[in-house]
Image: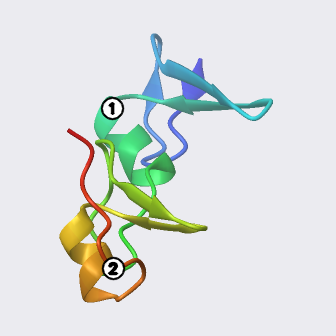
Amino acid sequence: MQHCETCGNSYDHPLEIRIDGETHYFDCFECAIHALAPVCRHCGVRVIGHGVQVGAAVYCCANCADMEEAAPGVRDRV
């Protein structure tokens, strides 16, 4: 039985997520998001949608990227 990497809960049907050759186990999507989703560089929210990437920085939306003056004129994906 696997233990959730985020909350430690033992669960007989965990989510198994493989990223870059590493396997991670979670008991729910919420725990997986908390552990694996990037954080917006401006507002700190977890980015679980498309977001905006400028270089290595990730933003939840074009507005946050603009607030950081990272990329003037960047637009959200539609």
The answer to which of 2 and 30 lies nearer the viewer is: 30
Residue located beneath label 1 in the image: 29
Near mark 1 (Cα within 10 A), the count class, few <14, some 14-19 or many ≥20, is: few
Under circle 2, the secondary element is loop
Residue 45, horizontal then vertical, whole percent: 26, 66
Question: Looking at the image, can residue 43 be seen?
Answer: no
The answer to which of 26 and 60 lies nearer the viewer is: 60
Q: Where is residue 66, by image quadrant?
A: bottom left
Residue extending farthest to the right is 21
**Which residue is pictured at 45% across the width and 57% down the height?**
38
77 in relation to 29, above or below = below
Question: Looking at the image, can residue 21 be seen?
Answer: yes
Quadrant in which the N terminus appears: top right
Quadrant in which the C terminus appears: top left
**Which residue is pictured at 33% across the width and 43% down the height?**
50
Under circle 1, the secondary element is helix
Residue located beneath label 2 in the image: 72
Residue 25, horizontal then vertical, whole percent: 56, 30
Residue 2, horizontal then vertical, whole percent: 59, 24
**Which residue is pictured at 48% across the width and 28% down the height?**
10
Residue extending farthest to the top is 13
Between marks 1 and 2, how big is the CA–CA gap? 34 Å
Residue 8, horizontal then vertical, whole percent: 49, 44
Q: Where is residue 67, by image quadrant?
A: bottom left
55 in relation to 5, above or below = below
Residue extending farthest to the front is 73
